């Protein structure tokens, strides 16, 4: 384009008046320019010089100009959006005679008011030019962002691989450095107690293992563990051994003793795992060298070079089956339990010979030092079944009391295995293909069941597609540490615990011995001592557990986010592979974890956040309607704000909640939103829970299609949620009231009923009702109710407490049978089918609706004796005889677990496809507050989809196909409940 003003080396910016000239005159000018102007250059050259297409030339509205002596070229325009005019640069030819210079124009301004035409940008410049600019900028920004993400991912991935493969190596290097420091300064470094012990044991133990390795290399009659003790360096074996033994002492000791067979197998498994990791690492390095076309033979051993050349020769001759067999032989083969036990026993023996402890300097200087072994091997009479008085002799490793002193405080210095990952886990593609990069990862926890492993390995990847996809979805959820909640936990823990569900940090003092000599008083004193020691053991284990959880939280606190690889138990329920700090664990863990990704609350999200807080506070509030729960929160806003601002020094309202640390996290998030100028745009990282209403009974109600049972567990819409626990408690109370009016002489339970009348409430029966559908036995129900009665503290006498718990358990189970008759019928049918199968000495097997094959692993064990360097160990092996009783009693709960696991995985996949973040805890589904409504609809749809299938009919058909020689009972009668009513029920999950 060209302006009508006289050309010079460049255009001067027009005045403001010109820039704001009327639109009509500008349009007319453009129309005239199209009619009369004949350009002196071709449109092709113009279009090449401009960054956008140029229209066909048109004449100006005054007489045509004579052509220039030479063609003119117009350079690209400046940013027309910013300047709103075109600027011709310096490379134009000299001005023609017909065009006066700008100076001449200015001098003749009043004399010759020749109209000057300013041409605004044509309308096509804006969409085309800007579209190209924005597209290019967006593409460049996306490429830069992708490159930054790629670099960041690679950095985190390298850190993750080092964490998996170099953990023990770093510990070895730490002890080397401490030894160097101690030699250089000739002074013991100031270390935590457990690290000081390890440092003292490290060098003697390492030298003992080196001697054993040399001996086994040169010895003619080698020991059974000889091929395996040389697979790792002595330093690394020493570190693994010390940490594994102290870990077992922390969480599994009884009176300072751990069973030798348990310790030996654990140590052997830890050594095997590290050997496997190093094997995979070496294999990955070799593959990388092959990909980079680097000749690896120089770094390989002679056998490996020969094997590689043999493989290459077979490939050239196209003998691929032989190549597969050869490569399969090269893969790491799992060690037998015998190998693990023998190697572990020998290493433990070396530890008992080299590890010593010495009490603090309280002894006389001239006296001999009190140095004694840290661990001793001995035989001890142990009662493994608390319900029986049978004692058996077991080999144990006894720890010196000095080791046990303040051991829980040092738990944070132990190496936690299978830490959360810094990058998303590998996608699952097979039984052992997925999860961690190098740590051994398996899609199912089979606990050594060969038949379950074979069933999973033989199933096609296509059949397992939805199962693997669900595990990938759960593993791709990114988490982070809620630092404000963690700070509150640390503060309360430092103050001594005993609040918010934290255990008391101090032991219970042992009662003083009564010297009166009375036999009854002496027996009572012994019983009190045993009880105090039991309480202290429980406190010790709980303190160690909390320290381990907090140590993981402290390590992950500075990370932007982390991930939990998931796998399945044999029934199809998903669990995180990291065992300490995860969202399936306690209130403390759930409180300090939150989604790494934040999303704006929105109107519905703020509503659900309030409901979530009320649910966590509990105390009966969770059984109100949604509006009632919102009203409860709004009536306690002052308490919520105080809890968020001053969790430790305020009125501590949040500590009165049933789930205090999760309640604190919700208080903080809600406080941020309500104090914000725009609550709906507040970013929330908090997972909002939607919990099933006694989910096991919900699945039985869906199987049985019984309308009354469906209404009792909220499969039907109602104004407020039905509470099956309160209903059972009311029925139990009525039954006890009737018994209390009977004559105690003829009805011994009458006295117990009178004692318990004031103690029956929802909490007393909740756990028993919840686990009844999972096959809780009378003994299990008795222990559950006994714990609740102990918490109430009303019944001080232990004999009375035991009798009351027996009576209450019996009445509770009777009430359950009366209310859920259809569910009991289905449970009975499932148990009968399992009994028929097990009587034929076959395990019960079925396939879940998602295609997961399940084999119940209950077989009778047989003893297998192996001779080790310390003693003969009796290992338990799976025999060929099934355990008929366990196969029958475990099948109904296991089958329902497989159904609720299928429902959770179906929901996880659907939520992922809808763009939601999802986490699941069996019957509790979590997502962001703004996405709760969408998740609620999805989980109801998937429940209906699951039970629209003829599940029991398919199960019976699979039994008849798998066990053709057996005859099974017909299906129980079912009702006519319309399952689509679930879609309308607001309290199905709430």
Image: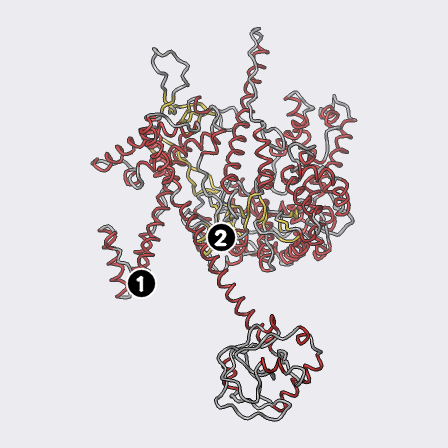
Q: How is the image coloured?
A: secondary structure
Camera-side residue: 733 or 297?
A: 297
Report x, y in % for residue 902: 58, 53
Q: Position of 492 compared to 878: left or right?
A: right
| Residue 743, visible in the rendered structure | yes
Report x, y in % for residue 789: 67, 28
Q: Quadrant of residue 132?
A: bottom right
Q: Which mark is residue 424?
A: 2
Q: Secondary structure at mark 2?
A: loop
Instruction: Report how far apart the C-alphas of labels 1 and 2 lie in the structure.
Output: 34 Å
Give the crowd class for mark 1: few <14, some 14-19, many >=20 residues within 10 Å.
Answer: few
Report x, y in % for residue 763: 69, 35
Give the crowd class for mark 2: few <14, some 14-19, many >=20 residues within 10 Å.
Answer: many
Q: Quadrant of the N terminus?
A: bottom right
Q: Position of 813 compared to 577: left or right?
A: right
Pointer 1 or 2: first along the chain:
1
Q: In the rendered image, which residue does mark 1 sit on?
A: 320
Image position of 754 with respect to 845: above or below: above
| Residue furthest out toward the top | 516
Q: Secondary structure at mark 1?
A: helix
Report x, y in % for residue 339: 34, 39
Image position of 864 with respect to 289: above or below: above
| Residue 964, visible in the rendered structure | no
Q: Quadrant of residue 769?
A: top right
């Amino acid at each position: 384009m060209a302006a009508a003003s006289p050309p010079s080396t460049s255009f001067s910016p027009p005045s403001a008046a010109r820039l704001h000239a009327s639109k009509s005159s500008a349009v007319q000018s453009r129309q005239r320019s199209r009619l009369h102007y004949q350009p002196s250059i071709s449109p092709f050259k113009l279009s090449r010089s401009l960054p956008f297409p140029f229209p066909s030339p048109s004449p100006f509205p005054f007489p045509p100009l004579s052509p220039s002596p030479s063609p003119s070229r117009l350079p690209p325009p400046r940013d027309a959006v910013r300047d709103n005019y075109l600027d011709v640069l310096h490379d134009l030819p000299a001005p023609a005679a017909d065009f006066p210079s700008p100076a001449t124009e200015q001098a003749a301004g009043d004399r010759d008011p020749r109209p000057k035409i300013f041409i605004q940008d044509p309308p096509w410049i804006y969409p085309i030019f800007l579209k190209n600019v924005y597209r290019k900028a967006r593409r460049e920004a996306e490429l830069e962002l992708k490159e930054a993400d790629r670099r960041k991912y690679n950095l985190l991935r390298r850190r993750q691989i080092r964490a998996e493969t170099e953990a023990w190596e770093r510990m070895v290097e730490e002890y080397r450095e401490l030894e160097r420091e101690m030699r250089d300064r000739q002074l013991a470094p100031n270390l935590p107690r457990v690290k000081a012990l390890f440092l003292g044991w490290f060098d003697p133990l390492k030298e003992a293992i080196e001697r054993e390795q040399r001996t086994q290399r040169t010895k003619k009659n080698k020991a059974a563990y000889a091929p395996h003790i040389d697979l790792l360096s002595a330093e690394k074996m020493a570190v693994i051994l010390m940490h594994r033994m102290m870990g077992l002492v922390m969480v599994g000791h009884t009176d300072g003793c751990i069973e030798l067979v348990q310790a030996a197998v654990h140590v052997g498994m830890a050594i095997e795992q590290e050997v496997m990791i190093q094997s995979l690492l070496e294999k990955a390095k070799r593959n990388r060298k092959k990909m980079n076309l680097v000749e690896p033979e120089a770094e390989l051993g002679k056998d490996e070079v020969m094997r590689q050349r043999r493989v290459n020769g077979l490939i050239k001759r196209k003998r691929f089956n032989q190549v597969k067999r050869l490569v399969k032989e090269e893969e790491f083969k799992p060690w037998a339990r015998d190998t693990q036990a023998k190697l572990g026993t020998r290493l433990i023996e070396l530890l008992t010979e080299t590890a010593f402890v010495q009490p603090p300097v309280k002894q006389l200087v001239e006296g001999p030092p009190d140095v004694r072994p840290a661990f001793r091997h001995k035989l001890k009479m142990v009662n493994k079944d608390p319900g029986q008085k049978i004692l058996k002799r077991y080999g144990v490793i006894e720890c010196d009391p000095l080791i046990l002193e303040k051991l829980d405080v040092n738990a944070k210095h132990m190496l936690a295995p299978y830490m959360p990952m810094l990058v998303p886990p590998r996608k699952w593609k097979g039984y052992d293909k997925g999860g961690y990069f190098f740590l051994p990862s398996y899609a199912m926890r089979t606990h050594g069941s060969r038949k379950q492993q074979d069933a999973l390995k033989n199933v096609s990847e296509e059949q397992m597609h939805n199962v693997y996809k669900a595990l990938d979805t759960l593993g791709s959820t990114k988490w982070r540490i809620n630092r404000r909640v963690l700070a509150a936990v640390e503060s309360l823990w430092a103050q001594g615990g005993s609040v918010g569900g934290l255990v008391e940090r101090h032991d219970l003092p042992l009662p003083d011995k009564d010297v009166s000599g009375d036999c009854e008083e002496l027996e009572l004193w012994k019983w009190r001592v045993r009880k105090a020691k039991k309480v202290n053991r429980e406190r010790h284990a709980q303190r160690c557990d909390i320290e381990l959880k907090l140590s993981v939280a402290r390590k992950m606190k500075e990370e932007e986010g982390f991930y939990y690889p998931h796998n399945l138990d044999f029934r199809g329920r998903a669990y995180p592979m990291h065992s300490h700090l995860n969202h399936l664990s306690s209130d403390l863990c759930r409180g300090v974890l939150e989604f790494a990704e934040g999303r704006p609350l929105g109107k519905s999200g703020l509503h659900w956040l309030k409901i979530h807080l009320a649910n966590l506070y509990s105390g009966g509030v969770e059984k109100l309607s949604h509006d009632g729960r919102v009203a409860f929160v709004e009536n306690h806003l002052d308490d919520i704000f105080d809890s968020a601002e001053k969790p430790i020094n305020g009125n501590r309202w949040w500590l009165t909640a049933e789930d205090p640390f999760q309640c604190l996290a919700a208080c903080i998030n809600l406080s941020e939103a309500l104090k914000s100028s725009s609550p709906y745009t507040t970013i929330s990282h908090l997972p909002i829970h939607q919990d099933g209403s006694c989910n096991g009974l919900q699945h039985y109600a869906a199987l049985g299609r019984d309308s009354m049972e469906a209404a009792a567990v909220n499969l039907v819409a109602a104004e407020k949620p039905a509470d099956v626990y309160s209903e059972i408690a009311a029925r139990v109370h009525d039954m006890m009231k009737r018994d209390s009016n009977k004559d105690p002489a003829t009805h011994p339970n009458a006295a117990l009923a009178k004692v318990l009348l004031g103690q029956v409430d929802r909490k007393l029966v909740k756990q028993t009702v919840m686990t009844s559908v999972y096959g809780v036995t009378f003994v299990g129900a008795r222990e559950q109710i006994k714990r609740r009665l102990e918490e109430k503290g009303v019944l001080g006498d232990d004999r009375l407490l035991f009798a009351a718990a027996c009576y209450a358990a019996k009445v509770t189970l009777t009430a359950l049978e009366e209310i859920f008759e259809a569910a009991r019928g289905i449970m009975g049918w499932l148990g009968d089918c399992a009994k028929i199968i097990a009587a034929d000495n076959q395990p019960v097997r079925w396939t879940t609706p998602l295609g997961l094959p399940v084999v119940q692993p209950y077989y009778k064990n047989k003893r297998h004796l192996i001779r080790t360097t310390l003693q003969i160990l009796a290992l338990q092996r799976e025999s060929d005889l099934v355990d008929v009783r366990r196969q029958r009693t475990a099948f109904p709960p296991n089958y329902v677990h497989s159904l609720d696991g299928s429902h959770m995985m179906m929901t996880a996949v659907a939520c992922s496809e809808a763009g939601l973040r999802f986490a699941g805890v069996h019957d509790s589904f979590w997502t962001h507050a703004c996405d709760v409504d969408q998740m609620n609809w999805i989980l109801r749809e998937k429940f209906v989809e699951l039970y629209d299938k003829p599940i029991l009919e398919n199960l019976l058909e699979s039994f008849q196909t798998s066990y053709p020689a057996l005859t099974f009972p017909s299906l129980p009668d079912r009702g006519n409940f319309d399952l689509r009513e679930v879609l309308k029920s607001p309290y199905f999950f709430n």
